[in-house]
Image: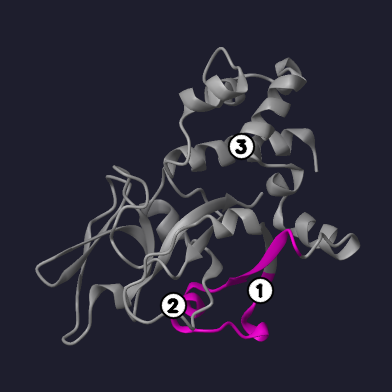
């Protein structure tokens, strides 16, 4: 993997965490010792002009390493060639959004790929469950379909893979003042959107102004939480 690829992935990682409210550009600049916003610097400055110490500072502040920025295939090959300590990582299955919505436990034949996430990262994510989901495998990955990336254009790049917390199906904002993004299953539609509820309907709110707001009638005897697959708690871009 080329250094320029790592640069692009680091930029995507920073933007994703800023959009999720996990960090701010000014906070990262301060902690890493930048004189300007790191997203602007990384977006506009050639690789050769980026001092190595700034990259090291960014990695340390973001708590990421090369494995976090490598693509999925390289992660898989690296895991096969030199397995990481099982105590430090958990394997999360990449599945279809259909299986993410309906399968309580994920059978091996449904898994398209296994990706490793640091246990420290997964364990610090807080659940907020409505209903009985204790038996559900908590974390799964799903690739965002093209209609979802268009609807959430500034949040989901083409080819984006989302990490879903299926133990978080409440509408309580995870970060104060920042709306959650959810994967929603209506029976006929698989959507990744902002979600709200009003007058017995689920409102699927896109990020793109050019995409229509969609309404889903909540069936009699069901609650809105039953339609929510899970909260999007991490966005990765495959290159």
Dot in front, 3 or 1: 3
| Quarter of the image with the N terminus in it | top right
The residue sitting at 62% across, 86% down in the picture is: 107
Q: Secondary structure at mark 2?
A: helix
Q: Quick check: can you spot residue 110?
A: yes
**Disc 2/disc 3 C-alpha distance (Å):** 31 Å
Q: In the visual, does 6 lie left or right of 79?
A: left
Q: Residues within 10 Å of mark 3 (few under 14, many from 20)?
A: some
The residue sitting at 27% across, 45% down in the picture is: 209
Q: Secondary structure at mark 1?
A: loop
Residue extent of the magenta highlight: 87-113
Which residue appears farthest toward the right when viewing the image? 81
What label sits on residue 101 in the rendered view? 2
Q: In the visual, does 199 lie left or right of 96?
A: left
Residue 51 percent coordinates (x, y): 73, 17
Residue 129 percent coordinates (x, y): 36, 70
Q: In the visual, does 166 lie left or right of 177?
A: right
The residue sitting at 81% across, 61% down in the picture is: 85
Residue 122 percent coordinates (x, y): 57, 59
Please report whichever mark, 3 or 1, sits nearer to the chain's N-terminal start.
Answer: 3
The residue sitting at 34% across, 79% down in the picture is: 188
Q: Quick check: can you spot residue 185?
A: no
Res 194 → quadrant: bottom left
What label sits on residue 112 in the rendered view? 1
In front here: 232 or 89? Answer: 89
Q: Secondary structure at mark 3?
A: helix
Please report whichever mark, 1 or 2, sits nearer to the chain's N-terminal start.
Answer: 2
Residue at mark 3: 62
The answer to whether residue 102 is magenta is yes
Q: Residues within 10 Å of mark 2 (few under 14, many from 20)?
A: many
């Amino acid at each position: 993997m080329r250094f320029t690829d790592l640069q692009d992935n680091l930029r995507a990682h920073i933007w994703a965490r800023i959009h999720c409210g996990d960090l701010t550009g000014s906070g990262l600049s301060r902690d890493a010792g930048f004189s300007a916003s790191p997203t602007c610097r990384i977006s506009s400055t050639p690789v050769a002009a980026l001092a190595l110490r700034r990259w090291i500072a960014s990695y340390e502040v973001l708590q990421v390493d090369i494995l976090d920025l490598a693509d999925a295939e390289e992660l898989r090959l690296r895991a096969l060639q030199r397995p990481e300590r099982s105590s430090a990582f958990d394997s999360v299955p990449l599945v279809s959004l259909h299986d993410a919505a309906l399968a309580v436990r994920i059978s091996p034949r449904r898994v398209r790929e296994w990706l490793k996430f640091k246990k420290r990262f997964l364990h610090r994510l807080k659940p907020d469950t409505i209903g009985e989901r204790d038996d559900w495998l908590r974390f799964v990955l799903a690739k965002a379909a093209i209609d979802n990336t268009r609807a959430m254009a500034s949040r989901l790049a083409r080819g984006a893979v989302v990490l879903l917390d299926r133990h978080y199906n409440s509408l309580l904002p995870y970060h104060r003042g920042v709306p959650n993004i959810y994967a929603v299953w209506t029976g006929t539609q698989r959507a990744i959107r902002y979600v709200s509820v009003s007058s017995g309907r689920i409102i699927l709110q896109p990020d793109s102004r050019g995409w229509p707001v969609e309404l889903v009638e909540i069936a009699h005897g069901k609650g809105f939480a039953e339609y929510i697959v899970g909260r999007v708690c991490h966005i990765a871009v495959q290159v």
